[in-house]
């Protein structure tokens, strides 16, 4: 969950977020999502019983051990404009919140997500609409200015089923979000440590969950036994 992007001034540390769909559902409602849909649910197998996961699935959030730090290369990345929202992670241990925002904001219209006026998400959407050409780091600076977001993250990071590590901890677990691009036909990996979205090939609304799980099996499973996956459904 360590950051890899930043600017000249020191960046804050947040307490790591737990991979827990019940907690994430409460957290996103605190940030401004209204109604019972969409919702997060565990994906218990990457190969079996995928048909039991409620459809449609709009995003897959994966938590996995980083192990050795990946080299940061722009070669496999695409321009941020292929998705509605991509933000750099400049806050230590904020990858859970980054994955949540990437999953929600890139599916706001596709999933007909209702956002409460005056909420944290409403402020991020307003910034997105007012400054569509903002860079990922400029978006990160705006995100850091949202005190209500930091307060909500802190509250829910401390409300998990496991004892939260200190904010200064350099934990090995990291969250990323897998979503479809604006066209709905490309599978994107959104990781705030990278310089932009990573294109992993073709997909569709009907095959997204199977395609995303295949990518997780190929890219993330070999990193260690503690991988978890949550689907944003409905």
Image: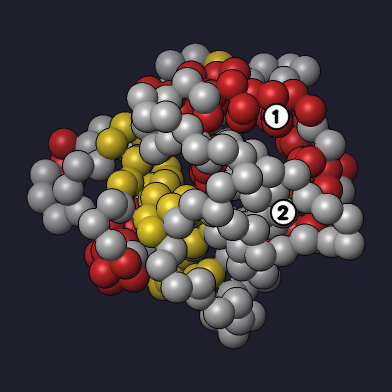
Q: Secondary structure at mark 2?
A: loop
Q: Which residue is mark 2?
A: 90
Q: Nearer the viewer, residue 234 or 219?
A: 219
Looking at the image, is 115 positioned above or below residue 136? Answer: above
x%, y% of residue 197? Answer: 58, 65
Looking at the image, is 219 positioned above or below residue 65? Answer: below
Q: Earlier in the sequence, mark 1 or mark 2?
A: 2
Alpha carbon distance from label 1 to label 2: 14 Å
Q: Nearer the viewer, residue 83 or 214?
A: 214
x%, y% of residue 66? Answer: 43, 63
Residue at 28% in and 62% down: 224
- Left or right: 104 as drawn, with respect to 41: right
Looking at the image, is 21 positioned above or below residue 217? Answer: above
The image quadrant where one finds the C terminus is top left
- Left or right: 204 as drawn, with respect to 86: left
Q: Nearer the viewer, residue 8 or 23?
A: 8
Residue 187 in view: no
Q: Which residue is mark 1?
A: 149
- Left or right: 215 as drawn, with respect to 117: left
Residue at 11% in and 44% down: 49
Residue at 28% in and 36% down: 42
């Amino acid at each position: 969950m360590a950051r890899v992007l930043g600017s000249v001034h020191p960046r804050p540390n947040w307490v790591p977020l737990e991979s827990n769909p019940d907690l994430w559902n409460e957290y996103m409602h605190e940030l401004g999502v209204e109604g019972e849909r969409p919702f997060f649910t565990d994906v218990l197998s990457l190969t079996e019983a995928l048909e039991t996961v409620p459809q449609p699935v709009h995003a897959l959030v994966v938590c996995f051990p980083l192990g050795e730090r990946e080299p940061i290369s722009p070669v496999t990345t695409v321009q941020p404009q292929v998705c509605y929202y991509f933000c750099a992670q400049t806050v230590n241990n904020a990858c859970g919140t980054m994955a949540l925002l990437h999953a929600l904001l890139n599916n706001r219209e596709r999933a007909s997500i209702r956002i409460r006026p005056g909420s944290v998400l409403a402020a991020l959407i307003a910034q997105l609409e007012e400054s569509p050409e903002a860079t990922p780091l400029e978006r990160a600076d705006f995100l850091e200015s949202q005190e209500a977001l930091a307060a909500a993250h802190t509250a829910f990071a401390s409300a998990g089923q496991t004892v939260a590590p200190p904010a200064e901890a350099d934990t090995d677990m990291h969250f990323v979000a897998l979503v479809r691009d604006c066209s709905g036909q490309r599978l994107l990996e959104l990781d705030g440590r990278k310089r932009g979205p990573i294109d992993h090939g073709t997909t569709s609304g009907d095959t997204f969950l199977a395609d995303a799980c295949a990518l997780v099996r190929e890219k993330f499973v070999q990193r260690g036994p503690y991988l978890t996956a949550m689907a944003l459904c409905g």
